[in-house]
Amino acid sequence: MKFTGDNVKEALSDARNIYQELSPELPFRYFFLDEHMKALYQNESRQAGFIIAFSFLSIIVSILGIVGLSVFLSLYKTKEIGVRKVNGATIIEIMTMLNRDFVKWVIIAFVLAAPLGWLAVNRWLENFAYRTALSWWIFALAGFLAFLIALVSVSWQSWRAATKNPVEALRDE
């Protein structure tokens, strides 16, 4: 039965009376389709909230890992950075040297993760009545954002290492 939202009580009363005339032995039961559809997708809504929360948490943990790794690498290469600066290397050259490995690993991780992500999301979307196609730009945007986050976090630490006084790095020699 379809009716407007203006007179819900009156429409339900009329439907109950007609139903009682046609089938008095069965109880009158009804539901609203919008509430039924909302109940069907409530699990997906809750799951989306968990996915967003854990995605945010994993991004923070990965940024902390990249920053920690870049701090370790810059401390490990302190003497090399000092020698390069004494020999005339610019800050950009030192930052490029330190960022090159991280950029390479981010690209390799994206190349491995993008097909797996596409497969997982595509299989998840098959469970819905109304399907949508996955666009390539979603994965490209995710890869670009991962690249940008890694580059910014590593560049900040590389800049700090490259702007240190080379005398401090070579003092222990």
Image (spheres, helix red, strand yellow):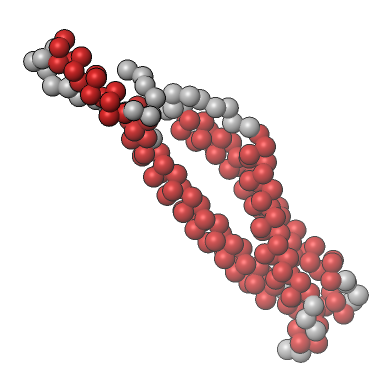
Q: Residue at the far bottom: name it.
A: 171
Horizontal and vertical percent for residue 52? 49, 50
In the rendered image of this protein, does residue 59 appear above or below residue 41? Answer: below
In front here: 49 or 155?
Answer: 49
Does the image show residue 37? Answer: no
**Quadrant in the rendering for residue 26:** top left
Q: Is residue 168 left or right of residue 86?
A: left
Q: Residue at the far right: name it.
A: 88
Residue at coordinates 57% horizontally, 65% vertically from top-left?
64
Horizontal and vertical percent for residue 133? 58, 27
In front here: 116 or 47?
Answer: 47
Q: How many numbered marks, from 0 up?
A: 0
Q: Is residue 1 left or right of residue 162?
A: left
The quarter in which the N terminus is drawn is top left
Residue at coordinates 63% horizontally, 72% vertically from top-left?
72
In front here: 109 or 129?
Answer: 129
Q: Is residue 35 left or right of residue 153?
A: left
Does the image show residue 1? Answer: yes
Q: Residue at the far left: name it.
A: 25
**Quadrant in the rendering for residue 165:** bottom right
Residue at coordinates 73% horizontally, 89% vertically from top-left?
172
In front here: 85 or 28?
Answer: 28
In the rendered image of this protein, does residue 88 appear above or below residue 113? Answer: below
Residue at coordinates 37% horizontally, 35% vertically from top-left?
38
The quarter in which the C terminus is drawn is bottom right
Horizontal and vertical percent for residue 14? 24, 19
Horizontal and vertical percent for residue 53? 46, 54
